[in-house]
Every structure is written in structure tokens, then in C-alpha cells.
Image (spheres, helix red, strand yellow):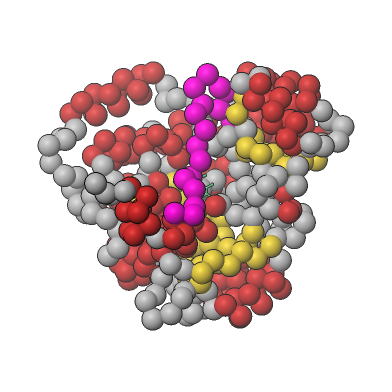
Amino acid sequence: MTDIDTLIANTIREDVRAGHIYNVPDASGYIKLDAMENPYELPDPLRQELATRLAEAVLNRYPVASYATLKQKICDKLGVPNGYDVILGNGSDEIISIIATATARQDKRAVLMAPSPAFVMFQRSAQFAGMDYVGVPLKADFSLDRAAMLAAIEQHKPAVVFLAYPNNPTGNLYDEDDMIAIIEALGETGIAVVDEAYQPFARTSFMDRLPQYPNLMVMRTLSKLGLAGIRLGYLAAAPALLAQFDKVRPPYNVNVLTQVAAEFALDHVAVLDEQAAKLNEARGELAAALAALPGVTVFPSSANFITLRVPDAERTCAKLFAERVLIKNLSKMHVLLANCIRVTVSTPEENSVFLNALKASL
Ligand code: PMP
């Protein structure tokens, strides 16, 4: 009989064996403010219409491999400049992994770089693709350390630099001139990926700059806009560059149901934009209420979440958990995030449950 531990030791990579799964806590019975989801559903009449479309979807065939209709709709409705194209991913998580797979060279260890703290999938995807990951610390106010980034680019010659704009987990937009200095410094030696997962809330973008910088790619997702369940991300760039990434994309990676739901949602994108505007308003109100609390520091956010420092993040998270509110404790993630927590902006009712439980924890 095969001993399973021996089998694992003989087959599975050492770093994978030593690693851990991407942890997603079970949220049943909790107010879920840990994952930057939009709390609003599509309005009922739209849900009914979508149900009809989904019922008509052809499920016995593979998806149309080119995804031409959905791609065209994304380009038309989401501001991709003329002459530029997109590839699609099963969430932008998959796109990050595609980018790492295509840039992890076999002749040398390639470097994937990002400011730090950043979205954890940058590091995980780099690791799994066999790249070296370099995180360049942000300044204490979470702005880019331009000099440090430029020095790190000079030293490590990264194949890819990810810049989340706004950044997760800090919520802020980086200074545009700092970003441009980085994109220009990479030039012909590295690709800059501006990750605009939170663009629906920030309402500012690097998409229009694609024609200016051939080494720029803009990555986005429908997740935060209100479609986290369908898993659709996209990467916009010059067609010649995208074609390289398309080679490592798994075939049929976006399923038929996602395709139908995404096309439908894009036809009604104004509804989602209104929800985002409502959440932006709620963000302002919640940030003001939080800033008024003694001992609490609120960091500026252009996303649908707020990052704040509390006197004791462990205590606050435990209290919130006891009140059945899930948020993210960022304390252990990075020295800059000591006693920081991150909360998704939600409905007025959920925001007030959070606020009250937080007050009780202080
Ligand atoms: N980029 C950033 C900055 C994120 O915060 C997230 C989600 N937390 C993602 C990408 C991934 O989003 P998705 O896979 O849902 O498209």
C-alpha cells in the first residue's frame, strides 16, 4: 500500500508542501465585510431577465473560444482605447497567474515586483510560477517610495511590476507622476501592470494611457462592481503584447454562464455604476464616523473598503467576530499595518452594525 506522506514528499514541490491554502473563512451567519463585495444584488426585474438568458445558454458545447462578443462589449463599454484589446480570466486572480506564467523565464530567475504591502496574489503567483518576488515598502502614509522603487527596478530588473490603483489593502491611489516614473523606468525591460480592481470606486484610470506606454497593461475585474460570483477579470493592452499572454491562458477559461451573465451585466452597467456611487457615499459617511472615534486613525480610501488603525486590532476583530461581523485583521501582514483592520463598505444597516461593534471594542 502506498504511504500518502511518502507519495506527497516524492511528488509535491517543497514550497507548496510548506505553504498554506489561500484562506477564506466560512461566512455563513456572518455579516461579510472582509472581501470587498458589493452588498447589492441586481434589481429583481433584471435578475428575472438574466435567469431567462441563463436558461437559454448552450451548456453541452464548450464556450466560443474567441470570446469575441464579450471582449468587444468590454472594449466598448469599459473604455478600452481603439486599437487595444483584452484577454479574459476566471477572475483577475487567474490573470495574475497567467502574467507570472508567461514572464517566469527558464534561462534565469525572473523578478516580479510590487510595492509592499500589496495584494497577496502577486507574491503567491510569482512563487508558484518560479519567480523571485520583490516587495518594495511603501512610505508610512502608504504612498509610493519613488526613489526606492526606481532603485529596486535598477537593481532587480523586474520582468513585471504590479501597481494596484487603488491599492489593496491600503485603499489609496498612488501619485500619478510616481506611477509614470516607474512605467518609464521599466521601458523595454519590464511590463507595468496597473491593477484597477477598485476602479469603479476610484473613477480614475490608466486605461487612456495605454497608447502612450507600450509596456503598460491595465487589469480589471467585474468582482468589486457587483459580480464577484461570476469570476471575470480582464487585461487590456496592445494586441501584440496580449497575444503572448493568450498563449498560456487555459482554453475555455471563462465558462458559458459567466459569459452570458457578464454580457448581460455590461448591458446594464449603469445600474452597477449607481450602486458603486451609493457605496462611495456610504464610504464617506463611514470614514467620517470612524475618524471621530478616539484612538482610531482612518486612512484615505478610493476603494470600496476602508483601512483603519485601532488601539488593539486583535481585540477589535475578536469583538466584531463575536458580533458576527467578519472583517480583515491586517496586523500580521506588514510592519506598516500594525493594528490595522480593513472593512468593506456595505449597506447603511451593515455599516452601522460594524460601527457599533467597533465602538464597543475600543
Ligand atoms: N487585485 C486586487 C488589488 C484585489 O484586491 C483583488 C481581490 N481582492 C483582485 C485583484 C482579484 O480579484 P478577482 O480575482 O475577484 O477579479
Q: In which quarter of the image is residue 154?
A: bottom right
Q: In the image, what residue occupies the spot 65% across and 49% down?
A: 333
Q: Name the one closer to the observer, 3 or 42.
A: 3
How far across and how far down the image is residue 200, in percent?
Answer: 53, 43
Question: Seen in the image, is 229 located left or right of residue 207?
Answer: left
Outermost residue toward the right in this view: 294
Vertical position of residue 12 compared to residue 297: above or below: below
Outermost residue toward the left in this view: 60
How far across and how far down the image is residue 229, in percent?
Answer: 40, 34
Q: In the image, what residue occupies the spot 43% across and 36% down?
A: 228
Q: Name the one closer to the observer, 77 or 227.
A: 227
For the magenta stretch, what is the residue range?
A: 17-33
Question: Seen in the image, is 26 located left or right of residue 310?
Answer: left
How far across and how far down the image is residue 27, in percent?
Answer: 51, 26
Question: Seen in the image, is 286 located left or right of residue 29?
Answer: right
Residue 239 in view, yes or no: no
Q: In the image, what residue occupies the spot 69% across and 71% down?
A: 148
Outermost residue toward the front in this view: 1
Quarter of the image containing the C terminus? top right
Vertical position of residue 233 compared to residue 146: above or below: above
